[in-house]
Amino acid sequence: MREQFGRIGTETLAALPRELNLGCGRKRREACLNVDRAARVNPDLVWDLDRFPYPLPQSHFCRIFAGDVVEHLENIPDFMEEVYRLLKPDGLVEITTPHFSCANSYTDPTHRHHLGYFSFDYFTTGNELDFYSDA
């Protein structure tokens, strides 16, 4: 299934996993559609996560993983809105990222953002600053 999708037809959609692993790197998940911009890590889909929209169907995925990838992205609010678009209602998103107090947050020269424990609260309903994003 390793390809850069154009349009997803009915047959492809039926075969598409219900779990998504964004920025998989070398940490592939067997039950997932694994996505990364680096073809050399052999993702199922080669795609730059800073390009929107992703060539994937809306409200399709029950679970989305983004392990140690958001700190590398250009625009986290746009990424979160795209994740929200892809996620089924009541789906689950699991995001990990180095805390800003961790030396690794600043050691890796490809990190664009340094995040804290409450950074993703801005994308939850009821947060006083939730108006910055539709996610």
Image: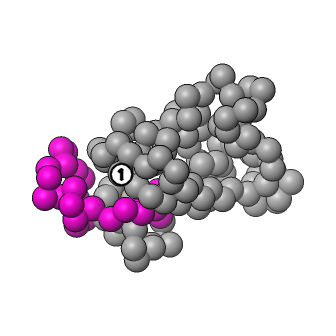
Q: Secondary structure at mark 1?
A: loop
**Count of picture labels:** 1
Q: Quadrant of residue 113?
A: top right
Mark 1 closeness class: few <14, some 14–19, many ≥20 residues within 10 Å: some
Amino acid at dot 1 = His
Quadrant into which the N terminus falls = bottom left
Residue 73 in the image: x percent, y percent? 56, 43
Residue beneath disc 1:
60
Q: Is residue 52 left or right of residue 4?
A: right
Q: Give x and y (percent) for residue 3.
A: 22, 59
In this view, which residue lies farthest toward the right? 101
Q: Residue 38 in the image: x percent, y percent?
A: 40, 59
Left or right: residue 28 versus residue 9 is right
Seen in the picture, residue 73 relative to 17 is either above or below; the reply is above
User: Is residue 34 visible in this depiction of the protein?
Assistant: no
In front: 7, or 115?
A: 7
Rendering quarter of residue 94: bottom right
Q: Residue at coordinates 27% horizontally, 62% vertically from top-left?
A: 16
Please state, as top left, top right, bottom left or bottom right, where the C terminus lies in the image.
Answer: top right
Give the magenta-colored segment's residue range. 1-24
